[in-house]
Amino acid sequence: MKRWIESIKQTKLLKSIAYFLIGIFTYHGIAIINRIKISGTEHLKNLPKKKVLFVSNHQTYFADVITFLHIFCAVKWGTQNRLGIPYYLLNPFTRVHYVAAEETMKQTWLSRLFKWAGAITVKRTWRKEGNEVQRGLDPADTRNIARALENNWVITFPQGTTKPFAPGRRGTAFIIKHTKPIVIPVIISGFWRAFDKKGLKLKKKGSLLRVTFKEPLQINYEESINSILEKVMDAIEQSKKFMSKGKHLSKTENHKIEN
């Protein structure tokens, strides 16, 4: 019964309804109250509709992914490097899944609705007595992500946390090595300033949100997991070498330094 209910939730009709409701609720915060600058969507136009993995730095629980979904839908309607008027929500691009911590998807009615939009829930990180605890990616979670990649795009955040320059998780590299997807690096900035940590409440109006899609990452899938992970972290500009470069102030906006 549970599997049947989950399969119903993933139908195109229900996902389209979820996209429409979430999109209408969030568009003004992304594109009107704040400003969004998008670049690199030319790298999305000729991608296949399956086995594409987007890897990105992470600044809020939900606003990052919601913005990606807006952009993917706009690109489907022929828009490049901008959102425009959200007519695209009438016929959204729904062949997208995203990796999210299981506990964050149960917190509000909107997060529960957002789960219908294609969440792959994992238990990689949780909080215990006020501290963040980490463990390896569960084999079942790995299988779910690999299964989603077979017929869809998947968004993942290799760091698994909103903390800037946190180390990447080997699970992402493991999935890349064994499923051999096209890997698109994404760099975002400004979301931590505009929204609260969950990404559902506005914190500062007039913020500039940046989303940059890079060209597909050149990967030798025979390389070690550590080598693949290093390339991914370099591509999203979250590796150690970017901590010592002034470039990261404009690209990823390390708020600890700015504050």
Image (cartoon, helix red, strand yellow):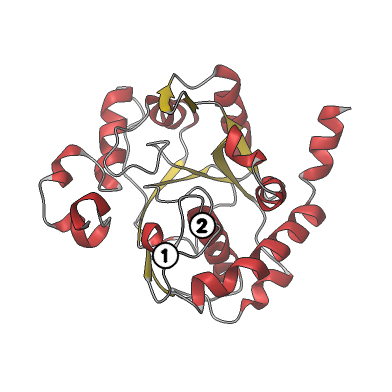
Q: Position of residue 15 (x, y in %)?
A: 74, 53
Q: Give residue 253's mark.
A: none
- Left or right of residue 222: residue 145: right
- Left or right of residue 26: residue 38: left
Q: Quadrant of the C terminus?
A: bottom left
Q: Quadrant of the N terminus?
A: top right
Residue shown at the point (50%, 75%) measured from the top left: 31
Amino acid carrying label 2: it is Ala
Residue shown at the point (60%, 34%) measured from the top left: 103
Vertical arrangement, residue 196 with respect to residue 73, above or below? above
Residue shown at the point (43%, 41%) measured from the top left: 157
In the picture, residue 249 is in which quadrant?
bottom left
Q: Is residue 94 visible?
A: yes
The residues bearing labels 1 and 2 have C-alpha atoms spaced at a distance of: 10 Å
Which mark lies nearer to you, 1 or 2? 1
Nearer to us in this view, 45 or 24:
24
Q: Which residue is mark 2?
A: 63
Q: What SS does tag 1 mark?
A: helix
Q: Give residue 194's mark.
A: 1
Vertical arrangement, residue 185 with respect to residue 207, above or below? above
